[in-house]
Amino acid sequence: MSDTVATLPPVDEPEGLPPTPTAPPEPPPGRVRSRLLSWRTAVIALVGTFAVALFCNGLLDLLQSGGDLHRLFTYSLDEARLIFLLSSALVWLALLGVVALTGRLWVTMGGFVAAAALVGMADAKKLELRQEPIYPSDLAFAGQAGFLTDMVGTGPVVMAAAFALLVLLVFALLGRIAARTYRPLRRRTDGRAWRRLAVARALTVAVVLGCFSYVAQFNEPHNKVREAYEAAGSHWAFWFQKVNYARHGFLGGFLYNLNVPAMVEPAGYGPDTMRRLAEKYSALADRNNQARDAAALDDVNIVVVLSEALSDPTRVEGVSLEEDPLPYTRELMRDTVSGDMLAQYFGGGTANMEFEALTGLSLSQFLPQMNTPYQMLVPETPSFPSAVGMLTGQGHRAVAVHPYMTSMYKRYEVYPTLGFSDFVHDSTMQRSDRIDDNDFISDASAFDEVLHQIEESEDPAFVNLVTMQNHYPMAGKYDDPIGVEGVSGEVADQLGHYARGLRHTDDALREFITSLERSDEKTAVIVYGDHAPAFWDDEVRERNGEDAFRRTPYFLWSNFADLPASHETVTSPIHFLPMLLDGLDAPLPPYYQLLKELHEEIPAMEQGEYHLPDGQVVSEDELPPRAARVLADYRMVQYDLAVGGRYGQGELFYPETR
């Protein structure tokens, strides 16, 4: 036989019969693998992102509590676990949205971990410096590297940025390793699956955006997210934001401080009510002003000086200094109207004290979430009622001087809204001297600018100065810090340089007042400290009590009128300008007459606390009847001027120009 195998001819299919079925073609191996991996990857991604969300929320809470692991496990993860899980779910939702938007799983997870670490560290630092957490309004400073380095120093900012970069690199590397096993879906390998995934990603982004637009209304009535927090055990501490963050974790506290109305509308508010109040306080003002000269301020310069971190460290128990840092200030305060101002915060709150002094509106009457009116309230309208508008209406030229960047608390936007016609800042001042190694412009240069503005102005000037020389951080500024005893380490270092800075302020103030005394122009001055410095440690604060660090000096002075040597126990900055006009025997507008009545009953107030003339601190429910009535009138007027229809502005304060 032949070794050759014969090839048989093909057999034709009989006509009329269906063709023999054949197996479907095998799909390309890559497509089968991509389908399997897409489901497996989705499950892994969901589990992985939720684990990262839990970690990020836990990291925020850990840093919020100062690194207290015991509190994290016994409170956040146990007693308040439902609140913790709810916050973690919101972080997870945000994480899924960003993953869907970018298509980058590992880099996004790394970005969230890095962001949680950065925000947590910033929150811990702010709590250390100012005893208050980060608010949503603080995000305006996130991109201001110059501001951040000035506030906390270059080292911490560089270290935080390096840490964030390291986290991102680690997660990017993990993503590269994972991609070797779970290859990402590619359009060229499975176009149909890729298109389905693209649609799913787009829907996910849309859903997440819709969810967070609703979450942003956290403080609106009947918001389901807020109701979920409250069902999980949230009890909001409206009087103390630090407690809110401690109780509800960083994210819960942050949500509570999202946009809210500045005030709750008082019962009975309306045009008729405001007309009655305007008539009431106009009658009181007319009676008070009968013997006063209507032109008393026509040729008077008025200077308001917010002296950064001006406080008296010699009053701190257990601490002594080798020399008095404020001898001249102390001498002035003995011979004029002076006393203690009730500061809102320890270590911060500058813009809020400035807002109160210029507007006469107290933050104690706003909702607690209205924590920075300069950023959250004033820019919302073309104009805002203030002493600036009142004085410019009487012929004064209004100038704001701040030897720092214009973006600080949106002052570039706020000052024109308040009515200032000129804003002199760090790059437009006549002088911008620094002392030794201090990065901030000296008070001597700031006072020199005020004198220049007064001299150059043809009209009487109203000058509002906010200084920067003594801004935190303190250490390393001067060649000759004042010696201290009673504290050691970093606190002693900070205190020695801070005290020397105060002495430079005191010397600059002496030169400023001496120049005004020699001037032919009539000038009246208000000087006040906005808060105590941030470096005092827990031991010193506990020994002295927190209230001791919320008292800063203030005084009123004039080079032409004898102001009585009266010494207030404590007052709020809303009263400074009415007190000055009263001391100069100038007519009081009805709004300032209301503040005068309030000052006689409640000289100082903050959230949840009312200081009576005899020094008692009471709640609103404990106020004497007349004090409660005046406070109710004041609250109605504040609502009208700040967020209401301003029905009473023209008659109570000055005609509105917007």
Image (tube, rainbow, N blue to C red):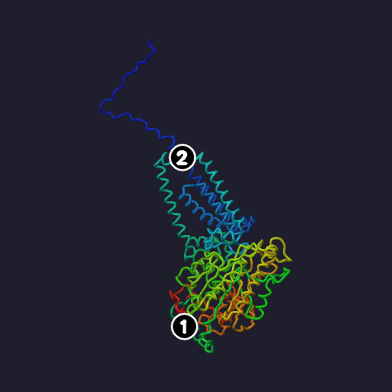
Is any part of residue 521 visible from this angle?
yes
Q: Is residue 264 left or right of residue 434?
A: left
Label 1 SS: helix
Calculate the distance from the C-alpha at mark 2 to the C-alpha at mark 1: 76 Å
Q: Which residue is mark 1?
A: 276
Label 2 SS: helix
Amino acid under label 2? Leu
Q: Quadrant of residue 521?
A: bottom right
Q: Residue at x 49, y 79 (%)?
A: 395
Residue density around tag 1, few if under 14, some if 14–19, many if 20 or more, within 10 Å? few
Q: Which residue is mark 2?
A: 36
Q: Which residue is more in the foreground, 77 or 379?
A: 379
Q: Is residue 101 left or right of residue 11?
A: right
Q: Residue furthest left?
A: 16
Is any part of residue 537 visible from this angle?
no
Q: Residue at x 53, y 45 (%)?
A: 172
Q: Which residue is more in the foreground, 400 or 456?
A: 456
Q: Nearer the viewer, mark 2 or mark 1?
A: 1
Q: Residue furthest bottom?
A: 291
Residue density around tag 2, few if under 14, some if 14–19, many if 20 or more, within 10 Å? few
Place of residue 617 in the rendered image (x, y in percent of width and height, measured from the top left): 62, 75
Say if mark 2 contacts mark 1, CB within 8 Å.
no
- Quadrant the N terminus occupies: top left
Q: Is residue 395 left or right of residue 503?
A: left
Place of residue 136 in the rendered image (x, y in percent of width and height, measured from the top left): 52, 62
Query: Does 196 sit above or below residue 297?
Result: above
Whichever of callouts 2 and 1 sits on the residue coming sooner in the sequence is: 2
Place of residue 612 in the rendered image (x, y in percent of width and height, measured from the top left): 61, 78
Q: Quadrant of residue 537?
A: bottom right
Q: Residue furthest top?
A: 1
Place of residue 225 in the rendered image (x, y in percent of width and height, measured from the top left): 49, 60
Amino acid under label 1? Arg
